[in-house]
Each structure stands twice: as structure tokens, then as C-alpha cells.
Image (cartoon, grey):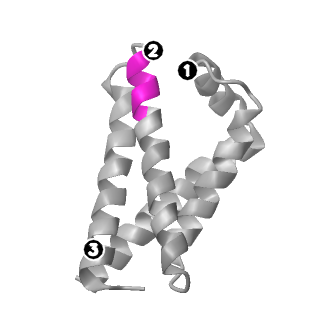
Amino acid sequence: MRIAYWIVTILIGVLMALSGVPDILMIPEALAIFRHLGYPDYLLPFIGVAKILGGATIIQPWFPRLKEWAYAGLAIDVVGAFYSHVSVGDGPGSWIPPLVALALILTSYYLYRRTGTV
């Protein structure tokens, strides 16, 4: 079970980091998506930094309370992404990835609590 925890946790940590970098760099594709969803440009780097910090925090073993908050923040981020895409009428191609990310976050959190992995 610990191996499953680390596989899922590292996967979600890396995915969040990889999705945060384009946000911080404000690449045109990330800006286009953010504008399509109706959010201001200045919020994009903030979200990107939060994703990277959250992903790194769930991987680190030293601060369990901070890890709990990071799980909550990542879950809020992907639920918000799902809701935003559904709200503007985007199809499943846009809102399924946040649901997959949410499933990975919840699986990682469940395994973290179940195994007591710190």
C-alpha cells in the first residue's frame, strides 16, 4: 500500500508542477484558457505557484499538517477547474482532466491516511 501511495502521490505532484509552470510563464495557451474561463490574467501566475507548492508539499514527508492543507488546496483547485469548464459550456475534453486529477488527489490522500505515511 505504501508503494501505491508513493506512485500516486509522485504522479499528482509532478502533474501539478507540470501544469503550474505554463501558468507561471503565462504562455499564450494557458492565457487563452484562463481568458476563456473569464478569469483575469494576473491570477494565472498565482495559481501556477500554488500548484507547484502544493504538489511539492504533498511529496515532502516532514510537515504533516502542511500536507493536509496542500491536499485541500489541490482539491479546491481541480474542483474549481472542473466547475469553471462546465460553467462556460466546455465539453468533456476540458472537464475530464480535472476529474482525473481529483481522483488521483483523493486516492493519494486516502492512501496517506490509511498507511500513516509521513
Q: Looking at the image, tell me whether mark 3 or mark 2 is earlier in sequence order.
A: 2
Q: Residue furthest top?
A: 89
Q: Position of residue 96 (x, y in %)?
A: 33, 35
Dot 1: what SS?
loop
Mark 2 or mark 1: name the one nearer the start of the chain. Answer: 1
Q: Quick check: 14 left or right of 31?
A: left
Q: Which mark is residue 111?
A: 3
Which residue is labeled 1 in the image? 37
Find the distance from the CA under tag 2 to the CA under tag 1.
7 Å
Which residue is disc 2 drawn over? 88
58 vs 92: above or below: below
| Mark 1 or mark 3, earlier in chain | 1
Q: Residues within 10 Å of mark 1 (few under 14, many from 20)?
A: some
* Circles 3, 2 touching at the beta carbon (< 8 Å): no
Closer to us: 29 or 107: 107
SS class of the residue under badge 2? loop
Q: Are marks 2 and 1 in contact (CB under 8 Å)?
A: yes
Compared across the picture, whether 24 is left or right of 71 comes to right
At label 1, the amino acid type is Leu
Task: Point out the stretch of residues depicted in magenta.
Answer: 82-87
Question: With respect to residue 69, does 89 lie above or below?
Answer: above
What amino acid is labelled 3 in the image?
Leu
As drawn, is 117 to the left or to the right of 41? left
